[in-house]
Image (cartoon, rainbow, N blue to C red):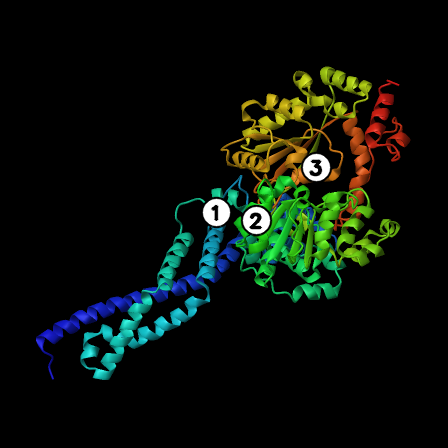
Amino acid sequence: MDPQPGESQAASGNATAARSVLAHATSFLAAANAVLAAPQQLRRRAREQHEWLRDQEARRLLREMPIDRLREASSGQVRLSGLEKAGVRTVLDVVSLSVEELQRYPGVGQKTAQQVRRAADALAGSARKQAVFRFDADHPDPAQEHLLGTLRALEVAEREVGELGQTVHPLTGLVEGLHKRARRAGSRVRMFFSTSRKKSEAREALGELANVLRRPLAERTFAAARRVGEAAGRDGRSPWSDYRQRAATYNTLLGRVTGEDSAESPASREEMPREIRQQISAISLDTGRLRVSLRGYQEFGAKFALARRLTILGDEMGLGKTIEALAVLAHLTASGRRHFLVVCPAGVLVNWASEVVEHSRLDVHVLHGRDRDERTHEWVRAGGVAVTTYDTLRRLPDFQQVRLGLVVVDEAHYIKNPDVKRSRTVAAHVRRAEHALLLTGTPMENRVEEFKQLISYLQPDIARKIRTQDALMDPRAFRRTVAPVYLRRNQEDVLTELPEKLELDDWVELGEADGRAYRKAVADGSFMAMRRAACAPGTVEGSEKLDRLHDIVEESAANGWKVVVFSYFLDVLEAVRTVVGPMSMPPLTGKLSPEAKQQLVDRFSAHDGPAVLPCQINAGGVGMNIQAASVVVITEPQLKPSTEAQAIARCHRMGQTRKVHVHRLMAKDTVDQRLQEILEGKTRLFDAYARESTTKDRNTAATDVTTLNQDLLHDTAIPMDQRIVQVERQRLHLD
């Protein structure tokens, strides 16, 4: 039966509306599939881009290898004179040539060509293994920029997929099914020839499809697809500025994509018992409450802390121990624990609170200041992460009724002395906690006994097994003994993308003015005056150290680098400001509140162009993150190796984008040289027992100091400052 004119017009209008709904559904399916497929596609693209860049690095290594290296790589004698006469200079020149092509050179027979080819292949394979790609923010190139763009898009895609969650999959399936059933409604002809039942089914499916596409999740999927598309496209924005701000994020993504993200250092892998490794492997880390991607070694560290319950994480400074602790906190929160305690030095209190907020979805309560009691009661009631300082902890209201899921003790070397109040207070909370995690980059500075004390807070049975005399005889056995409680990884083992650190001892000879100031300090018997005589305010005009500092700052400014200058002494920092002039920021000192310190660091980091931040080493050497600086200057040797190491690690840490230049200003034939001679022993002791890198060569050659009273200088029965003063007085014939 022919349709009536009115029916035909209505059908036509209905078909048009239906086609609009169906087209909307098709767009939704395309958007959903694009979002869900984007992470895998972008990972594949990033791997390909990284492989190309790594190949370029390998080619650079081969380009720097002279052709003579082929002789070293060949099992027998190989004749290269024919190639050399023909202008072949590097191994790279040879790698691209086949045996047949090599034989075309005068004097190169088949045997020589085969030997050369095998040697070149061996060197090329070695170069490929050695090649480590690093982003170079100082020399950006298009290939690196494209990889950064891909990683930025991957970050967006992974975030969007994570936020959509698993619910988008059933929604996609529902839309596909409804679209198939409603497709008939988009065709006036098909609807005309359909039965009433099929027409009704199509219209019903179409209506349901329209309703489904109006759901918030569908709108979120469209929005996610737009954001992923914008991030994956070439939007004209350079990613370098973002990389400089968030280098750690980009390098974490790259490490995961390429599979080059080391979970363990070689030494920890060798010395950790198999049963502990199995315990760690059995843990499935819940990172749902984190806002940050973990490096492989960070995930391993968090799982180690969870598997062993009471542990020391001694990762080298700059590796992100705070993030590892947050991963443990997030996992325990997901498993039902409610109350957690972080104890840290006052200087990093603000940083800890901001790290919890920025990198996790955990509630944080800062128990410090005038309202600490009120905040403590709120934490007890609501749960979350309480952050407080060593000194404040013993002044808080009693919270013994709270079951502590985890106690984190940051800069745990603060409690090496069991006889001080803060150590006893912290130890009491550690003992009653379900999990405890001690964080310290330098757990063993002077004596193995101090390291043993830290272990005794956690695992007394292991501590009782440690005898100092045994450790002195066999450092590897010592590390195997503490493996169930102690994990340490060094930067060179796990952060291959970290820019190189160049350390220089800048030796100067005192001139007339600073020499006179130093001699007077020795005559007065003032150890502290001796340490700062070379660059105190009274010697600004005639200070060789400050002249050298001025040169370093000028060179750094010419390169656009920021500089941090560390000193123990406030008057030296004032002298630094005088020498540096307008480029100098206000000094970061212990007099500033934690908030003011962080604001000053933020201002320094955000400053456009070169700048200098004078910094009191005990105020800015612990916990502050100053990755914006590419140059570190230490104006005088410190009394403990760890003090300088902590200061350097404020800049040379995860997130750094440039090579870090470390300058130690040292004056010859002064207290500086005497301190270095004494402290060499402490550094070697730490390297032997607490660092894992046992394969590295140690330079134990001593400075030639035969004219000094060596017995007096190294007499540990006399305080170090008194020894040095007496030795210097004798050297200068003042006694």
In this view, the mark in front (2 or 1): 2
- Give the residue number, with chain letter if any, for mark 3: 644
**The N terminus sits in image quarter:** bottom left
Q: Residues within 10 Å of mark 1 (few under 14, many from 20)?
A: some
Secondary structure under badge 3? helix
Q: Sequence order check: which comes first, mark 3 or mark 1? A: 1
The answer to whether marks 3 and 1 mark residues whose Cβ atoms lie closer than 8 Å is no
- Give the residue number, with chain letter if any, for mark 2: 365
Position in image of residue 584 (x %, y %): 56, 27
Position in image of residue 16 (x %, y %): 20, 68
In this view, the mark in front (3 or 2): 2
Relative vertical location of residue 54 with respect to residue 345 in this rendering, above or below: below
Question: What type is the residue that disc 2 sits on?
Answer: His
- Give the residue number, with chain letter if any, for mark 1: 145
Question: What type is the residue that disc 1 sits on?
Answer: Glu
Dot label at residue 376: none
Question: What type is the residue that disc 3 sits on?
Answer: Glu
